[in-house]
Amino acid sequence: MDLTATQWIMIGGFIFTIGTTIVVNIYGKGEWKGTVNATLEKLSQKIEALTKRVDKIYEVFLELGVGKTLESQSPIRLNDLGKEIANELDLDSLADTHTLLIKAKVESLNPYEIQQLCFRYAQEDLVNELAEKSPEQYKAISFAAYKRGIAREDILKIVGVLLRARVLRLMNYSDADMSKKPKPA
């Protein structure tokens, strides 16, 4: 079977077309895959950043969230349940024993930062110390939370508020205006 020049041109064109299609598809899909991977990576980074922001908001909500023992007035203060629990567990004396330790850490901080540190201290350092050195008091706090159906952190927030109030008084901040440090009398 002899092929004519036209037939050879058609076969060559067909092979060229198929080859070109294969090369373009392989290259094009590789490039598309790279573009998709790059886009997915950017999307993943944005989701991660958004997750961190949501976690930070959640963390602040948990640290300063009003919860069941605090009022949302500024500055944050105890509600009736918080006062009742503070009296029942004698949390004032617990706050008294830790006030000077906190004051030494906050000399250059503003009232908001002091408040943050007091909440963090009560919910992290103090709770660990109580668990190790004063298990009876730790159990009493846990039981009071259980008895009322609230989180132990809500009771620790009470200690944070009590610590903050004592430290700010020692630093000559007035209760009426926590944003300015008055001149000592």
Image (cartoon, rainbow, N blue to C red):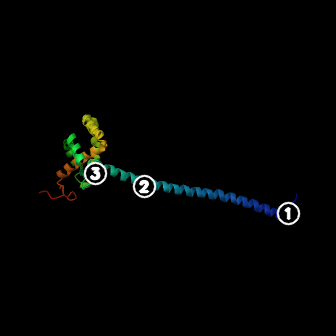
The quarter of the picture where residue 50 lies is bottom left
Up-down relation of residue 135 to residue 156 (above or below): above
Q: CA distance from mark 3 to mark 2?
A: 23 Å
Q: Secondary structure at mark 2?
A: helix
- Name the residue: 52% across, 57% down: 39
Q: CA distance from mark 1 to mark 3?
A: 90 Å
Residue nearest the viewer, comparing 179 with 19: 179
Q: Nearer the viewer, mark 1 or mark 3?
A: 3
Q: Nearer the viewer, mark 1 or mark 2?
A: 2
Q: Secondary structure at mark 3?
A: helix
- Local crowd at mark 2 within 10 Å, few (<14), some, or many (≥20)? few
| Residue 152 place in picture, x, y as percent | 30, 42
Instruction: Tell whether label 2 touches label 3 (CB within 8 Å).
Output: no
| Residue 47 place in picture, x, y as percent | 46, 54
Q: Which residue is mark 2?
A: 50
| Residue 51 place in picture, x, y as percent | 42, 52
Disc marking residue 176? none
Disc marking residue 116? 3
Which amino acid type is shown beneath numbered disc 3?
Gln
Q: Which residue is mark 1?
A: 4
Q: Quadrant of the C terminus?
A: bottom left
Instruction: Tell whether label 2 touches label 1 (CB within 8 Å).
Output: no
Which amino acid type is shown beneath numbered disc 2?
Leu
Residue nearest the viewer, comparing 68 with 61: 68
- Name the residue: 81% across, 62% down: 8
- Local crowd at mark 1 within 10 Å, few (<14), some, or many (≥20)? few
Residue 161 appears in view: yes
Earlier-in-chain disc, 3 versus 2: 2
**Residue farthest to the top, as pictured:** 136
Which amino acid type is shown beneath numbered disc 1?
Thr
